[in-house]
Structure formats: structure tokens, C-alpha cells
Image: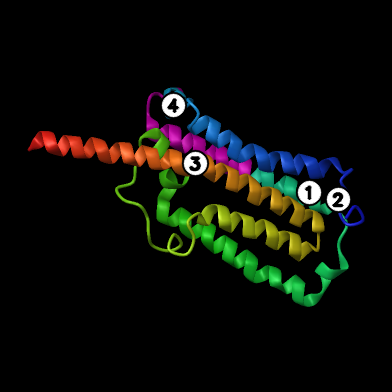
Amino acid sequence: MSDYIDFSQPSLWISAATILFNPTFWNIAAQSGQEYYNKTITKLFGNNPRYGCYGLAVTIFSLGILRDFLYDTALAHQPTHPALLTPLVHLAAIPLFATGTTLVLSSMYALGVTGTYLGDYFGILMDAPVTSFPFNVSDAPMYHGSTLSFLATAIWKGKPAGIFLTFVVAVCYSVARRWEDPFTGMIYTKRDEERKKAGNKAL
């Protein structure tokens, strides 16, 4: 394994650190008492939750660009594997990347900016869950699509280190979902209960 993944390269660990940092950051910023409970980000934007969400969106997007840059930098310092350089394996990266990109972009289109970038933690809730594509083929298309794109890049460049980092991505997103999914569900359950109470009072 050490012949094909150079664990002594600092760029490998820097890339892994940014992969771990990003979902940790947005969960702390949006969930763990900072925005949902204390409205910290909203207050920074003049008590305007939509502007606060946009500010977080820009931050998350920028961190994603940095993460991808550091991932590419890490792969540039890593050895290749002969099995990943065969034409068939090399070309297999194309449909993987196309699928990953489609899942990410279509989910962003379906959710919009506030739906994509944690608007529900700012009190900007959607009327109903999105069930159209890509949510009818994946329960987490942003995460699944991003993981596929990481894997595609690793295969295209023939870098086992990229596959290792893709595994880090998959595990990180899986852990994040164990926190995010129940929390988001709680927000909408609370909203529905409040609507039901309001409806009963109206009667």
C-alpha cells in the first residue's frame, strides 16, 4: 500500500483535514447552538435570516473550492497505480464524474440556494419535501454526487491516494448525515405541529 500511497506527503493530510473540516464547520455553524438556537449568523447580517443564509452559502461554497484545490494538489504529489492507468479503467471515470455532477447540480436546482445551504436552520423552510429527480434516485444526492466526483477524479488520474481520500469523504458524509437528518426532521416536525395547533385554534 505504501508503494502507491505516500503517507509522508503533508498535502495528503492537509487534504484529508479540509475534507473533515467542511461538514464539521457547517454543522457547528448552523446547528449546534450557533444559528438554529442563538441566531448568531442572522445577527451578523442585521437580523436578516435570508442574508445570513446567503452569507453561509458563500462561505461553504468557497470552502468547497479550497477543498477541491487541495485535493488536486494532494493527488499531484502521489504515485499512480498501473491498474488504474488502463484505458478501460481510465474511461470509467467519465460516467462516474457525469453522474456525480448531475446529482449535485440537479439537487441544487431542485432545492434552490436556501434549500441547499441549510436555510431550514435559519427558519427558511420549504413547503414540502422535494421528491422529484434527483431525490427519487438518491436520498442524499449532494453527498452521493460529491463522493462520486472525488472517486472519478482519483480514477481519471490513476491515484490510489485519491481512492483513500474518497473513502474519507464517504465516511465523513455518512457521519454528518447521522447528525443532520434527525435534526432537519425535527425542524419540520416542529413546524408541522405548530401549523396543526394554529389550525385547531382557528376552528
Identity of the residue drawn at 41% across and 56% down: 110
Identity of the residue drawn at 49% across and 60% down: 138
Q: CA distance from mark 1 to mark 4?
A: 34 Å
Among the two numbered marks 3 and 2 on one chain, the one whose residue lies closer to the N terminus: 2
Q: Residue furthest left?
A: 203
**Quadrant location of residue 13?**
top right
Q: Looking at the image, which is closer to me, 135 or 14?
A: 135
- Side (left or right) of 59 relative to 8: left
Contact, mark 2 vs mark 1 (Cβ under 8 Å)? yes
Q: Looking at the image, which is closer to me, 86 or 176?
A: 176
Q: Which quarter of the rendering shows the N terminus?
A: bottom right
Contact, mark 3 vs mark 4 (Cβ under 8 Å)? no
- Return the mark for residue 73: 1
Residues shaded magenta: 44-64
Number of the front mark, 3 or 2: 3
**x, y percent for residue 135:** 44, 59
Among the two numbered marks 2 and 4 on one chain, the one whose residue lies closer to the N terminus: 4
Residue 50 covered by magenta stretch = yes
Kind of residue at badge 3: Glu
Q: CA distance from mark 2 to mark 1?
A: 7 Å
Q: Secondary structure at mark 4?
A: loop
Residue 94 covered by magenta stretch = no
Disc 3 target residue: 180
Number of the front mark, 2 or 4: 2
Disc 2 target residue: 77
- On the question of residue 134 being in view, the answer is yes
Kind of residue at badge 1: Thr
